[in-house]
Amino acid sequence: MRIAIMGAGALGGYFGARLHQAGQDVTLIARGAHLGAIQAEGLYVDSPNGDAHLKDIKATDDPSSVGVVDCVLFFVKNYDLADALAQAAPMIGPDSFVATFQNGITAPWVAAEAYVF
């Protein structure tokens, strides 16, 4: 399964790392210094469920370079969701699954309005 994680911060990075460890083809969408650190050093997970250092996880700031994926998981802040959905459009195909993980009640409706095929 090809999975893209929009927002590779604490939660997105954690779930992306665990999916990668489970053998899924994961690409993290990140930006700035965080992206640079992942690309240079890999992704570190420090967790009571087991630490990990993933040197081979993919990361980019360009969703259009990823191609269409099976699943996009959105871990961005609720106020960034609409922009993130627009940026992720090149990764979304008619059979792609989109899930949002925001602390806010509007996220499902914002996502549904963005991807009407």
Image (tube, rainbow, N blue to C red):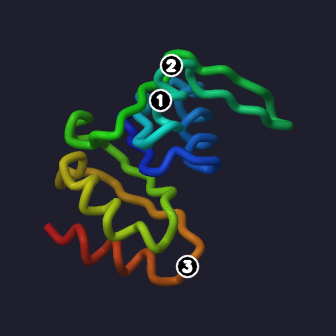
Q: Residue at x 44, y 52 (%)?
A: 73
Q: Earlier in the sequence, mark 3 or mark 2?
A: 2
Q: Residue at x 70, y 32 (%)?
A: 45
Q: Residue 50 at x, y = what percent?
A: 79, 29
Answer whether labels 1 and 2 touch (C-beta < 8 Å).
yes
Element type where label 3 sits in the image: loop
Element type where label 2 sits in the image: helix
Relative to 33, residue 89 above or below: below
Answer whether labels 1 and 3 touch (C-beta < 8 Å).
no
Relative to 15, residue 106 above or below: below
Q: Nearer the viewer, mark 1 or mark 3?
A: 1
Q: Nearer the viewer, residue 17 or 24?
A: 17
Q: Residue at x 81, y 35 (%)?
A: 49
Other-residue count near label 2 (Cα within 10 Å), few / some / many at <14 / 14–19 / ≥20: few
Other-residue count near label 3 (Cα within 10 Å), few / some / many at <14 / 14–19 / ≥20: few
Q: Residue furthest front?
A: 33
Q: In the visual, does 116 lie left or right of 75?
A: left
Q: In the visual, does 115 lie left or right of 17?
A: left
Quadrant in the rendering for residue 62: top left
Find disc 1 in the rendering and name its residue: 36
* Mark-to-mark CA distance, 1 and 2: 6 Å
Which quarter of the image is occupied by the C terminus?
A: bottom left
Find disc 2 in the rendering and name its residue: 40
* Mark-to-mark CA distance, 1 and 3: 29 Å
Q: Amino acid at mark 3?
A: Gly
Q: Residue 110 at x, y = what percent?
A: 35, 77
Q: Residue 20 at x, y = what percent?
A: 53, 28
Q: Amino acid at mark 1?
A: Gly
Find disc 3 in the rendering and name its residue: 104
Relative to 101, residue 36 above or below: above
